[in-house]
Image: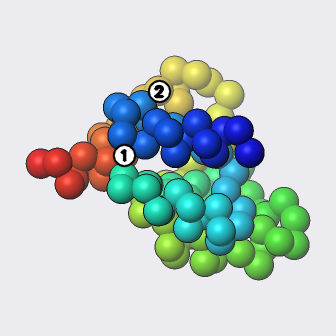
Amino acid sequence: MKFIHSLEEAENSETIFVITDVRYKNEFDWIKSFDNGCTIFLDRYDKNMNLIQPGNEYEERNNKWLRDTADIKFVWQTVDDESYKKRFIKKNKIIEEIQTYLIKDYA
């Protein structure tokens, strides 16, 4: 896979890569194999504050392990209002928590 080779070659750069939708343990383990490999689990609620259920049987089986093992966990409410999303991110210090995790070894 070309993107894997690019990521491995860029490991010592200051570039931050974001890989969305990790579903398999080997993908999770690969991310954690990097010095600053950080995993984030996101739970999402609908507009009525009901937890969005897993999209398929595989997610239903694996979400607990992925959630429990993730370095950072967030709960996100589904909203259409972009300004609310920005306020939510700021209020919950989401970016700060990710930055703190990524630089913890360099402080």
Q: Earlier in the sequence, mark 2 or mark 1?
A: 2
Element on which disc 2 rests: helix
Distance from the alpha carbon under mark 2 to that under mark 1: 16 Å
Element on which disc 1 rests: helix
Q: Residue at x 56, y 67 (%)?
A: 29
Give the image quarter of residue 72: bottom left
In the image, is 48 to the left or to the right of 6?
right
Name the residue tied to disc 2: 86
Q: Position of residue 36 (x, y in %)?
A: 36, 52
In the depicted view, which residue is nearer to us: 38 or 60? 38
Give the image quarter of residue 18: top right
Quadrant, the N terminus: top right
Q: Neighbour class for label 2 at 10 Å: few (<14), some, many (≥20)?
A: few
In the depicted view, which residue is nearer to us: 76 or 72? 72
Q: Residue at x 65, y 71 (%)?
A: 25
Q: Position of residue 95 (x, y in %)?
A: 37, 38
Name the residue tied to disc 1: 98
Q: Which residue type carries mark 2? A: Lys
Q: Is residue 35 visible?
A: yes
Q: Residue at x 78, y 73 (%)?
A: 60
Give the image quarter of residue 12: top left
